[in-house]
């Protein structure tokens, strides 16, 4: 169902990437964000809640929030979208007191595993790092594969090429100023999601028959799931999803890193508002799933097509090509937000938790942990450590990017050798 030419697809990707790089550069001109550890990995620890809440929300908008939310509304109606959205919001509410607590334990910290190292021992700390790195590998892999799949579907540009382009421009702007880059682009990307939604969703709903067409599909494809407390959906999907999401957010360095970056007094409200801002996205996109579930709308999945793509099919059926392209950019903004957050999170885990320190550096870190005053020699050591940590952080970004791309390419090879992709819907 290609709606754009190869050239248009490449141009759109490059324009999006160039915009993110320029905005990051302009917003990171202060040397603190580019040349100090606290600036690069914690954005100076002074991010206000107004920016922090948007960053928390959009960095939690993984591919499932964009695609599985629509799929659940389509397949399982009202209870499906409820049991997808409610646990996601609950996770961010749970993080509010935990973020405040870890900030109290580690006022000069950067990663949650640092507390494990101090609380237990080095062996436990190393084991604890495994799920943290694994989570960021998933973040990079999933966003690359899904973002690449969208543009491949809409433009016909080879999937591998799209993934590489997305990876390179995200890595480029993330390497400029680390956490600061992620915070700045998060705000812009959330704004793009909302503006894209305000353009595409009402237009699609109106073109499909209005609110009445949406309401006729709230029971899902079978028409039977109209109660939030449908026990079949709750026990087969809801409870399992809730447990998985809560476990996941506690192993996600992206959120712990924001706990160290946002102003301490703003942490609680940042996570609460972030949860609300997150919920707006899947609940709004659910309308596309309800429309698809309404048989009168005339949208159906082709044989072999992934049901998570049902939302794009609905938009493509009713809107012109340029509007579908705007919808694709909206989805790309959300995916790139998680992608850059995953890169920065992995960078902090590698630079802070995996690389050795000299005895002088360990002494300095202990002084900072105990909030002791620093002498002139400590200042010199800190400047040297800043340069070393930033260099290591960028190496960590490159490493997780390469690993994520390798896994995504492996998925393509494995899947397409068994089941060739469907290019024409």
Image (cartoon, rainbow, N blue to C red):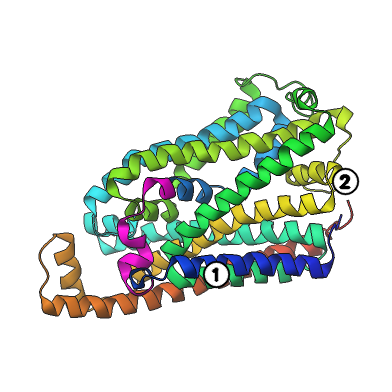
Could you say which disc has been placed on residue 335 in the image?
Answer: none
**Quadrant that contains the N terminus:** bottom right
Residue at 19% across / 80% down in the picture?
380
In the image, is residue 228 above or below residue 330?
Answer: above
Badge 1 crowding class, 10 Å Cα cut-off, few under 14, some 14 to 19, many 20 or more, is few
Q: Nearer the viewer, residue 302 or 233?
A: 302
Coordinates of residue 414 in the picture (x, y in percent)? 73, 63
Coordinates of residue 126 in the picture (x, y in percent)? 35, 63
User: Where, by quadrant of the figure, is residue 381 drawn?
Assistant: bottom left
Could you say which disc has been placed on residue 303 in the image?
Answer: 2
Secondary structure, mark 2, is loop
Front position among marks 2 and 1: 1
Query: Taking 379 as reference, is 307 left or right?
Result: right
Range shown magenta: 34-52
Q: Magenta part mainly helix, strand or loop?
A: helix
Q: Earlier in the sequence, mark 2 or mark 1?
A: 1
Coordinates of residue 88 in the picture (x, y in percent)? 52, 38
Secondary structure, mark 1, is helix
| Residue 31 in view (yes/no) | yes
Query: Taking 168 as reference, is 50 left or right?
Result: left
Residue assigned mark 1: 22
């Amino acid at each position: 169902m290609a709606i754009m030419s190869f050239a248009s697809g490449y141009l759109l990707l490059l324009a999006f990437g160039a915009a993110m790089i320029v905005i990051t550069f302009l917003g990171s001109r202060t040397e603190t964000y580019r040349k100090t550890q606290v600036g690069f990995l914690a954005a100076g620890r002074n991010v206000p809640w107004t920016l922090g809440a948007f960053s928390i929300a959009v960095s939690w908008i993984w591919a499932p929030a964009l695609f599985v939310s629509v799929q659940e509304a389509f397949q399982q109606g009202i209870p499906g979208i409820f049991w997808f959205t409610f646990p996601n919001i609950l996770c961010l509410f749970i993080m509010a007191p935990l973020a405040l607590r870890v900030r109290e334990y580690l006022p000069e910290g950067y990663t949650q595993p640092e507390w494990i190292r101090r609380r237990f021992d080095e062996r436990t700390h190393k084991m604890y790092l495994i799920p943290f790195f694994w989570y960021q590998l998933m973040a990079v892999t999933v966003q690359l594969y899904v973002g690449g799949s969208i543009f491949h579907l809409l433009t016909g540009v080879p999937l591998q090429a799209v993934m590489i382009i997305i990876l390179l421009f995200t890595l480029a702007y993330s390497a400029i100023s680390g956490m600061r880059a992620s915070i700045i682009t998060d705000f812009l990307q959330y704004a793009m999601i909302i503006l894209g939604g305000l353009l595409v969703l009402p237009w699609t709903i109106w073109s499909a028959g209005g609110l009445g067409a949406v309401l006729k599909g709230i029971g899902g494809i079978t028409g039977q799931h109209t109660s939030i407390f449908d026990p079949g959906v709750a026990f087969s999907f809801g409870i399992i999803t809730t447990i998985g999401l809560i476990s996941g957010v506690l192993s996600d360095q992206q959120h712990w890193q924001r706990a160290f970056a946002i102003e301490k007094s703003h942490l609680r409200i940042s996570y609460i508002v972030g949860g609300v801002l997150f919920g707006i996205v899947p609940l709004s996109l659910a309308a596309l799933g309800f429309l698809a579930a309404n048989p009168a709308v005339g949208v159906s999945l082709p044989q072999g097509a992934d049901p998570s793509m049902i939302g794009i099919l609905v938009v493509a059926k009713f809107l012109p090509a340029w509007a579908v392209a705007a919808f694709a950019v909206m989805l790309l903004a959300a995916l790139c937000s998680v992608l850059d957050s995953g890169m920065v999170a992995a960078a902090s885990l590698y630079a802070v938790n995996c690389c050795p320190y000299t005895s002088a550096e360990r002494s300095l870190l202990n002084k900072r942990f105990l909030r002791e005053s620093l002498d002139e020699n400590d200042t010199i050591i800190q400047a040297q450590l800043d340069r070393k940590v930033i260099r290591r952080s960028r190496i960590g970004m490159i490493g997780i990017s390469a690993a994520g791309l390798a896994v995504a390419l492996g998925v393509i090879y494995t899947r397409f050798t068994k089941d060739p992709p469907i290019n024409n819907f």
